[in-house]
């Protein structure tokens, strides 16, 4: 279809679905292929370009005094046909037009709008790029066409597949679809998308492909059957298809045969708005499809222009390749030049006066202008570039010397310079410009195939994805408006493995994609607080994993507490011992004038009772949360008080021996060394030695509180470390040394006369004391945490009770229950009354 003008713009459109090539023989003449399968939407695309040029010619502000013409070709969805048409435009083989009365010739073709297929655009641009002829495609999306070195003159008003792939991945992420199948067409469009999609999907971490298949061209039912069987067996519920309408038509025939339902289809822009697939027969399978569609736009006046088309629109003679004629015959099912027998068979003759408004045709449907909007923008891009070029002021142009382009000597490469810088706004409000790769502003509509209860179909816009220089890619989706073709009316789940919940980590399944994994619970002491965690994180030192391993909680603390049963029992025993000491001390004070109290070294007895009372009380320092001051005091206090206690016993034993020796003839001189002052001095010196040991220990390596995590993984044991083990051993060794000396002296005095029988009580008490502390050492070393403190408290209490009962029990018995024995005569006498009995 041609229209004359001062400047010609070429157009390449798919007005027919396919073409049939005649059989060739060695003797036959070469002939053109026959185009078949008229496509009303493809014809509307061509007419949109005609409308845009007509609108520009009527606009006095754009290209004044210049008339645009066009040459529109049908590529018949066949590479050789489209390539031949492009070469015709470049070489000027089209018919000559009368431009002016005195000028007959071929006007220049300065730009081409097309092609619709990526493969066709690649082949065409490889050639016409050599002439720097601008080619603005409205439907070719292959990302390979962004290569400016190979395609320096290629532009497009549709986003690149690189952006479409990213938009598709964003949709997958939005609904958590990490397991999907990919189907692509067997051409540059599909194969480039397959490589880009797999690469970008892996980099984004948005999911994995369960399978990737290539849809063949032509009639190959065996291959299609195999592909559908792969889809049927796969656990992936989402199928992404980057292919053309013809591929989907063939694929859906096989899907219907095998009745493969329950799939969520994601459509590329090539078939996202294909009306031929939105039929009652296919909607049970394709209903709810989400597609990335070309940006929809409004073109005022287009419908009126289309409705005015008549066969006489083309001024050339009738011929079989006339687009308008074929459209008319297709729409009204009639013939202008019927074949023999057409009328007899009931066929209608075309008159050219049929009412197009009453015809049932999608040709006049301008409610969903998408490729048409891109065509409209492509034509205007060339027009604005040409207008900018012709408005150049001589002497200020961008070319050599500097010069401007002249209409009489116009070159295509000059127009390409201005096309790169074009920038305008459409009546719909969209800005049109090209980046350094010839790509327009990336923007897509998200479409949803709505299947209404009455069986009709509606294509609704549910979102938009747009890319800007500052905010990057932004997906806006109205999920509440989306129709889901499932019983749940909710988006399906399409995952190879369900997400690992907090408290678990992912482990790859051997030989499977990264999206296929097992969920393994985190080990003790580790946690994961997010879904699909690759690793479990160790909790901090003072924390432990919760039972679900999803958070870290503070570790339980353990120490000998006043609130636990063991602590309560030991505290009670300590207070009981203190009370008994106080009772005994009170008895002795009350009966201090009696012979029994006076005969047993009253001062040392009182001092011993006080020290035993302090022994019971010092055990309380081992109970409760260990702190620095309690750790320092507990062992030092225990060591000094026990030395005081044992020192008193040692001095009492020595006094017993001295008194016995003094009772013998010539032994009176011994007692002068064991007077009251000497007894006090001895106790003080022995106790001071322990005080020095404790002081040195605390100064050099003081005991301190410590958080021990070695005993239990999930507990913190608070304990007092002794600091210097040598200091602790010396402290205990000194107590043991004094106790052994006391035991030996008492043992030697056990057979003294009955009136000096306190030595037997001391012997028995020291035996208990030594037995307790000998047993303490291994028990203390092998007891963890609070039980070590409990063992030490038990040793303190046991030895203290042993001394209290062994030394003061018999005396209290006599004082309270046998007062007749509590006389000087009974104690000093050697008669039948014997205290040892």
Image (cartoon, rainbow, N blue to C red):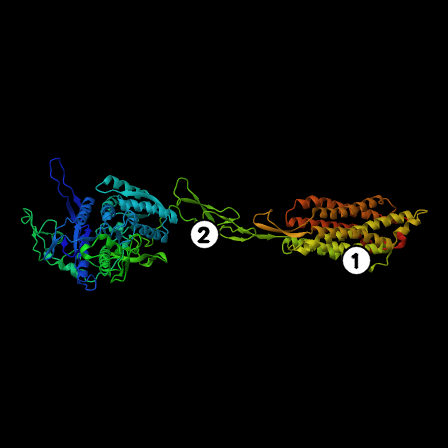
Estimate the x, y position of residue 126 in percent, counting from the top left.
25, 46
Residue at 38% over, 49% down: 204
Q: CA distance from mark 2 to mark 1?
A: 68 Å
The 10 Å Cα crowd at callout 2, few under 14, some 14 to 19, many 20 or more, is some
| Label at residue 362 | none
Q: Residue furthest front?
A: 401
The foreground one among 25 and 257 is 25
Do the numbered discs 2 and 1 sit on residues whose CB atoms are within 8 Å? Answer: no
Q: Which residue is mark 1?
A: 585
Residue 555 in picture, x, y percent from top left: 56, 52
Residue at the farthest bottom position: 60
Residue 809 makes an appearance in the image: no
- Circle 2 residue: 530
Return the x and y of residue 303 as percentages of the image width and height: 18, 60
* Residue 129 x %, y %: 24, 48
Neighbourhood count class around disc 1 (C-alpha, 10 Å): few under 14, some 14–19, many 20 upward: many
Q: Is residue 708 above or below residue 64?
A: above
Number of the front mark, 2 or 1: 2
Secondary structure category for the residue under label 2: loop
Identify the element where label 1 is drawn.
helix
**Looking at this rendering, what residue extends furthest in the right direction?**
665
Give the mark, 2 or 1, whose residue is nearer the N terminus. Answer: 2
Q: Is residue 27 visible?
A: yes
């Amino acid at each position: 279809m041609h229209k004359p003008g001062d400047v010609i713009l070429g157009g390449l459109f798919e007005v027919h679905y396919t073409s049939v090539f005649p059989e060739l023989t060695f003797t036959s003449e070469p002939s053109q292929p026959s185009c078949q399968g008229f496509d009303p939407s493809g014809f509307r695309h061509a007419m949109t370009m005609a409308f845009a040029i007509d609108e520009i010619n009527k606009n006095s502000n754009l290209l004044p005094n210049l008339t645009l013409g066009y040459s529109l070709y049908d590529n018949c969805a066949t590479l050789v046909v489209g390539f031949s048409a492009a070469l015709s435009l470049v070489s000027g083989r089209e018919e000559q037009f009368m431009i002016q009365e005195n000028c007959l010739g071929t006007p220049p073709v300065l730009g081409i709008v097309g092609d619709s297929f990526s493969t066709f655009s690649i082949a065409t641009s490889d050639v016409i790029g050599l002439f720097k002829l601008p080619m603005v495609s409205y439907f070719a999306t292959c990302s390979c066409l962004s290569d400016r070195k190979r395609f320096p003159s290629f532009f497009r008003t549709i986003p690149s597949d690189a952006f479409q792939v990213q938009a598709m991945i964003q949709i997958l992420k939005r609904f958590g679809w990490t397991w999907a199948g990919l189907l692509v067409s067997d051409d540059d469009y599909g194969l480039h998308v397959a490589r880009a999609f797999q690469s970008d999907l892996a980099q984004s971490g948005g999911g994995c492909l369960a399978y990737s298949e290539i849809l063949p061209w032509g009639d190959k039912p065996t291959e299609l059957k195999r592909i559908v069987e792969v889809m049927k067996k796969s656990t992936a519920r989402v199928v992404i298809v980057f292919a053309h309408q013809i591929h989907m038509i063939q694929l859906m025939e096989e899907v219907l045969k095998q009745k493969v339902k329950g799939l969520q289809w994601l459509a590329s822009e090539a078939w996202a708005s294909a009306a031929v697939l939105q039929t009652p027969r296919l909607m049970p399978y394709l209903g709810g499809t989400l597609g990335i569609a070309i940006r929809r736009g409004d073109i005022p006046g287009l419908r009126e222009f289309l409705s005015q088309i008549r066969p006489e629109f083309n001024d050339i003679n009738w011929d079989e390749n006339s687009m308008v004629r074929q459209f008319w015959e297709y729409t009204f099912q009639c013939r202008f030049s019927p074949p023999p027998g057409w009328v007899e068979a009931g066929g209608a003759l075309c008159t050219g006066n049929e009412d197009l408004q009453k015809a049932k045709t999608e040709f006049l449907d301008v409610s969903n202008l998408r490729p048409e909007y891109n065509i409209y923008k492509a034509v205007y891009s060339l027009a604005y570039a040409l207008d900018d070029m012709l408005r150049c002021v001589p002497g200020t142009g961008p070319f050599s010397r500097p010069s401007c382009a002249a209409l009489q000597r116009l070159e295509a490469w000059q127009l390409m310079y201005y096309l790169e810088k074009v920038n305008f706004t459409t009546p719909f409000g969209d800005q049109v410009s090209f980046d350094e790769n010839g790509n327009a502003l990336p923007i897509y509509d998200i479409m949803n195939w709505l299947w209404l209860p009455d069986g009709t179909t509606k294509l609704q816009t549910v979102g938009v994805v747009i890319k800007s220089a500052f905010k990057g890619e932004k997906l806006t989706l109205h999920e509440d408006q989306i129709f889901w073709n499932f019983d749940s009316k909710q988006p399906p789940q399409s995952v190879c493995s369900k997400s690992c919940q907090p408290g678990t980590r992912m482990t790859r399944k051997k030989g499977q994609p990264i999206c296929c994994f097992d969920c393994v619970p985190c080990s003790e002491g580790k946690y994961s607080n997010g879904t699909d965690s690759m690793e479990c994180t160790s909790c901090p030192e003072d924390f432990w994993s919760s039972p679900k391993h999803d958070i870290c909680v503070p570790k339980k603390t353990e120490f000998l507490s006043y609130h636990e049963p063991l602590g309560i029992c030991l505290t009670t025993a300590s207070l009981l011992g203190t009370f008994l000491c106080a009772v005994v001390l009170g008895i002795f004070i009350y009966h201090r004038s009696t012979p029994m109290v006076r005969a047993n070294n009253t001062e040392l007895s009182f001092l011993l009772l006080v020290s035993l009372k302090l022994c019971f009380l010092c055990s309380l320092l081992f109970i409760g949360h260990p702190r620095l001051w309690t750790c320092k005091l507990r062992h030092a206090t225990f060591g000094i008080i026990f030395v005081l206690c044992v020192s008193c016993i040692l001095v009492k034993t020595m006094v017993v021996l001295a008194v016995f020796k003094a009772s013998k003839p010539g032994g009176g001189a011994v007692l002068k060394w064991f007077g009251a002052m000497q007894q006090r001095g001895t106790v003080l010196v022995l106790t001071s030695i322990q005080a020095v040991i404790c002081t040195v220990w605390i100064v050099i390596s003081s005991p301190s509180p410590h958080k021990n995590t070695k005993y239990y993984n999930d507990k913190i044991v608070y304990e007092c470390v002794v600091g210097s083990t040598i200091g602790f051993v010396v402290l205990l060794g000194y107590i043991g040394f004094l106790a052994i000396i006391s035991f030996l002296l008492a043992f030697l005095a056990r057979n003294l006369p009955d009136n000096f029988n306190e030595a037997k009580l001391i012997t028995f008490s020291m035996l208990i004391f030594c037995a307790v502390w000998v047993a303490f050492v291994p028990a203390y070393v092998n007891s963890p945490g609070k039980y070590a403190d409990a063992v030490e408290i038990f040793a303190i209490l046991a030895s203290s009770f042993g001394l209290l009962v062994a030394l003061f029990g018999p005396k209290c018995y006599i004082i309270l229950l046998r007062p007749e024995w509590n006389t000087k005569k009974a104690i000093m006498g050697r008669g039948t009354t014997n205290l040892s009995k």
